[in-house]
Image (cartoon, rainbow, N blue to C red):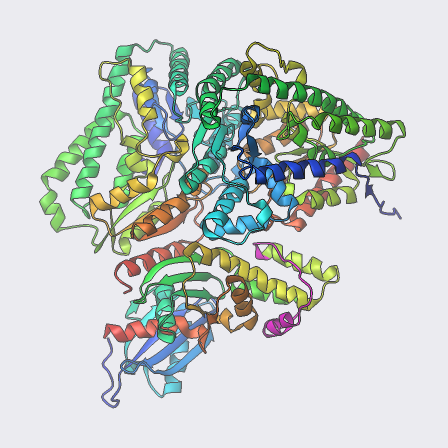
Amino acid sequence: MVEKKRYKLNRLETTRLIGPLVDRHWAELREAKERGEKVAWCSGPLFIFPYAMGMKCHFMAGYAAYCAGRKAGDQVLEAAEADGELMDTCSYHRLHTGMAAAILRGHPVKKEVILPIPDLLIIGRLCTEMAHYAEALHRRLGIPVVAVDFPPPRRKEDLPRLERFVVRQIKENLIPTLEKVCGKEFDEEGLRRILRVLKEAATIRNQCWEFFKLKPTPWTLWDYGVSIAPVFYMMGKPETVPYYKALLCELKERAEKKIPAILPDGEKYRLYWDGWLPWAFLGMFIRKFVSYGAVPICGRYPWEFFPHPEYIDPDADDVVQNWVELYYTKAQQAAVFMPEGALEEVTKLVEEYSIDGLVMFASRTCRAWNVGQQEIINEVERRLGVPGVVIEADMVDSRMVSEAQIETRLQALFETIDARRRRE
Amino acid sequence: MRRSSARRAMTAVAGVDVGSIFTKVVIIDAESRDIISFSIMRSGASHENASRSAAENALKAAGMSFDDLAYVVSTGYGRSRVPFADRQITEITCHARAAKFFFPDAHTIIDIGGQDSKVIRIDDDGKVVNFVMNDRCAAGTGRFLEVMAAALEVDLEKLSELARKAKRHVEVSSVCAVFAESEVISLIASGHEKTDIAAAIFRAIARRITGMVGQLGIQERVVMTGGVAKNEGVVRALEERLKVEIAVPEEPQIAGALGAALFAAESL
Amino acid sequence: MRAVENPYRTVYEWKERTGKKVVGCYPMWLPEELVHAAGLLPVVVWRSDEPVTVGHAYVQTFNCGLTRSFVDDAVRGKLNFIDGFVIYRTCLQAQELPFILERHVRPAYLEYLYLPAIFPGNATKDFLIEELERFKASLEKFAGREISDDDLRRSIEIYNENRRLLRRFYEFRRENPGILRAREVMAVVWSSMLVPKEEHSSWLRELLSELEGRHEELLKERRVKGDLKVVLTGALCQTPQFEILDMIEDLGMVVVDDDLYVGYKYFANDVELDGRRPLEALADRYLRRKPTCPTKGDWEMNWTDEVVDMVKRNDADGVISLLIKFCPPHLCYYPDIKRGLVQAGIPEVMIEVEHEIVSLEGVRTRLQSFAEALRRGA
């Protein structure tokens, strides 16, 4: 008789440090108007610009993680529905329109997830939904909008001209608008300062990534997932570098002492996670994974955040150009949003991190990644012999999640991996 | 049109509500609008047979025959398969009519049936101005309650009583009856009290309905019709969520048929 | 009507008859004139009537009907007779389609355009023209011939003529409600998307003179008898099921106007040549902000006002919103339209249109309740 092994998650200590940092970010955002500060709600890769101008900035996906953390996600979504929003729309869209509904019509929602109405909505149309939510908020709350079309590239030969297009829009539309709203000239030095910190933070973060290659791994994708903020919506803040330094320190220690992320002696299955991170269900998913001895290791979305800090040049003559190059010609960060770029990235990650199986998260209200997902599974299976499964859930909306269904599919994946191992 | 019987001084009309699970027939006096008799029967496989049988039952109880009916209006899912109907009107319009009949100040009607649920807004004159219908999934319908009661291994009628004794707050969060069923099962497995789970089930239905109500906005008085309104737990959960008093007629299940009968009377 | 019964056969037959190569253009705003000027036969990609089967292995059930139908057709080999495809970033779902086509259809020509959102500023217009130049060059390569400005002007004029005729056709319907069935009107517009424009125009010209010539007689024998006048709004990219249109009419509501894609949106604006470079004129048509299209990213657009205007212009009793399920551009806008119509005191009902019709009964109940309410509660 084979005894079922009991696995236990061994969370990192350092990730506890992120909580207060994140709380402070949101507190600052909530209090911004009282302090007479300008606020922008931003989507896509553009919030470095309002940050450079000293604006407080809210980021679309960050709000989902925040609501999830405050256990207010469902409440805000219900407010949206009560206001007439259709359930099939993107959860991020409904979170924001739900917040607007709470403001406009007094639907009951936890106070701390109500953010002050911003001075500006900045659309970075990397995902077309980012335009829709801003349009809706503009219609309902009258907030001014500035937008940059940020098309994800299908082929390498498209990169240069898309890059030119985005740079031009930023210079001709975004920056003049920011200058007008903030009543001062664009702070290029502010931009460079942020880039300097970001470069250093991302470089250290990349060293942390190396530890995912270890078997057993000392940390999980979830540990990293909650640590993205410092290279994302907290970019440029001085505390971001010490955070990653502490993270690196703990990882080095674990590696030396051979302490794994999954006790007692490491993971049985190393997984790739596709799509967004399921912010409101991180706990549920990690519990399920760990119960099988599985650990999520990498994913194209969390790997999108400045994987090549060597290209960040805070002293470049044209810093706007330098920033956009990260998304296009130099680091191709925008490419993973198209199935072509995704296939390439997934294949790379699977090999680099010795992945055993793919978990393709398809959010039922998001259509950004899903058309290519099954194809990617098929292709990776063909090329690398690694199986995959699609899981339907959502980033935030618990009504779209069935634990039983997820359990069944995960189990099927692990059984497939086991079967292959027996054959080898 | 059937000739009214020379033997009787009053004119009788009928409303036939053919639902997917139950068929309801109401016979009223066309002038006084008093209910003479009514009948509720399972619809079964044939709507024609069900409507005829239910009508026969109601007529028998009233001591009448088909010839005594001056006008018949059908409504409900199977409204087009009532061979003796003179006219068919949707259940939305009929429930609205009945609600206003029972409560002249009705403005918002919540109808939860076996397989669907609707929220209807009417103006001061009782005219339907807006409505929201959920007929594609079991959440927020009688079916949901049935499935949950089965999962709890409790009689449907006992659910409200159970819920009243709830002590701890537990959540059934799924929007889908299939998902919710497995949620309930795992709640039982983790040792939660049936009383608490029952209360959570009612809250889940209320949440679903609230979403629909919100789309139209609440205007009092709020009235509930449909079979599920007999379930006190649902009414209470809705009142708590919506923060309004909900009026329920004595026989909410026949509201559709009564509304149809009232239209029949007006058609004479 | 015949042309739309089996779009595959229709397009195939025109391909045989003209000897031209067929290029499928993804809805909604691709400048087909460029394809036409290259001597190719542009057709607009359509939603089939068959339920999706194999396709669900490659696309989720929560993608819109057109996406799923197109993927299903692609993987089943039903599109192999089409020589080329042009897709652009209409929405999130469209941008993922070239990946599937490349792997399952392997067309001789596959082009993906980055038609930009309509944001203010010169960058947008310049980029659009750059894209169109590139598109032109890739078409020339595929067609093996140059597209001169004169070629393009000619094609534009042919397209404008078709649009003018369609506009006249819609005006005829507005002035003579009830002569034409809604499905017939939709078939007239849809067929224009499937057959060469020149042929369609000559056929439509004949139809119009017959209709206009006989309109008094036709009014007497009105085919759609109804006491209520309604307008339809929504349905981006794809046709709703004709059964729904029939049902509307069966319940006594006469469709007098619409702003659907397979409808008014398709022929709304001409390309204004005005002595300009024809490519620029094409770009300008794309950049026009009316009629509103939520896929274009224009945050100042006001769809609600346009719907209200449509109601007033036609003295309609109410609005039927045809909401294609899983179409975010429409879904995200819809609550504001609903609110606006309620505020303007215009009755409206929303019908969700699915690719696989789950419940026609539910649609009938909603439409019938709406009609009953319009008639003042029966």
Q: Position of residue C261 (x, y in %)?
A: 33, 36
Q: Quadrant of the C terminus of chain A?
A: top right
C191 vs B16, nearest the viewer:
B16
* Left-right relation of B266 to A404: left
From what the image shows, is residue A240 above or below residue B251? above
Residue B266 image-quadrant placement: bottom left
Q: Is residue C321 left or right of residue A224?
A: left
Point 50% across, 36% down: residue? A118
* Image vertical order of residue B87 relative to residue A131, above or below: below
Residue C323: quarter of image: top left
Q: Is residue C202 visible?
A: yes
**Height in image: A388 above or below A110?**
above
Q: Is residue A369 visible?
A: no
Q: Is residue C78 above or below residue A73?
A: above
Pick the front one: A137 or C134: A137
- Say which of B37 and A127 sits in front: A127
Magenta segment, principal secondary structure?
Answer: loop
Judge whether residue B175 is colored magenta: yes
The verdict on residue A341 being magenta is no
Kindly identify the residue that appears in the image at 44 percent across and 50 percent down: A84
Q: Residue at x 20, y 36 (%)?
A: C169
The image shows residue A151 at horizontal and vertical percentages of: 49, 24
Q: Which residues are magenta?
A: B153-177
Asked if residue B109 lies left or right of residue C211, the reply is right
Query: Could you tell whether C239 is left or right of A208 in the image?
Result: left
Residue C57 in the image: state x and y as whole percent.
Answer: 57, 37
